[in-house]
Amino acid sequence: MDAVTYPNGRVKAEMAGWIFRKVDISEVPREVPRAFGVVAIPVAIALDGDGHVLGRLTGFVEPEEFRGQLLRLRGR
């Protein structure tokens, strides 16, 4: 994802409307990935302003699929 999907220009443009945080699960308490049901990496989890999960993508996702998921979550 870091090498192909996130640097993609169309993905970057859509992600500009989101707050993006990358978390290395080896560097946080076990409770953090457990709280979000992380069972495999990479995983991208979209949350609303109250911390509720809107959606998730697990594993590698091609740029256009990732962007499409962001658009769907945004309602476009």
Image (tube, grey):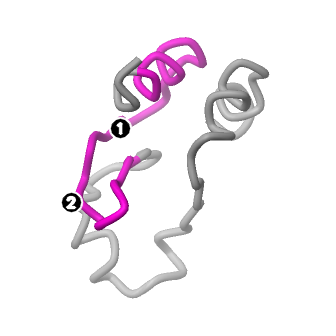
In the picture provided, is 18 more to the left or to the right than 70? right
Q: Quadrant of the C terminus?
A: top left
In the picture provided, is 63 more to the left or to the right than 42? right
What residue would you read off at disc 2? 37
Query: Residue flagged by tag 1: what amino acid is it?
Result: Thr
Query: Residue flagged by tag 2: what amino acid is it?
Result: Gly
Above or below, 71 against 6 in this view is above
Q: Real-space Cα distance between discs 1 and 2?
A: 11 Å
x and y percentages locating residue 10 in the rendered image: 71, 18
Callout 2: helix, strand or loop?
loop
Q: Residue furthest top?
A: 64
Callout 1: helix, strand or loop?
strand
Marks 1 and 2, the one that precedes in the sequence: 2
Q: Which mark is residue 18?
A: none
Q: Residue drawn 23% across and 71% down?
A: 34
Q: Quadrant of the N terminus?
A: top right
Residue 61 lies within the magenta run: yes
x and y percentages locating residue 75 in the rendered image: 35, 24
Q: Residue drawn 72% across and 31% down?
A: 12
x and y percentages locating residue 65 in the rendered image: 47, 15
Q: Residue drawn 32% across and 69% down?
A: 33
Image quarter of residue 58: top left
Is 25 in front, or is 6?
A: 6
What residue would you read off at disc 1? 58
Identify the magenta region: 45-71
Circle 1 Cα neighbour tier, 10 Å, few/some/many (<14 / 14–19 / ≥20)? few
Image quarter of residue 57: top left
Above or below, 7 against 25 in this view is above
x and y percentages locating residue 25 in the rendered image: 47, 70
Residue 49 lies within the magenta run: yes
Q: Residue drawn 33% across and 55% down?
A: 48
Is 15 in front, or is 37?
A: 15
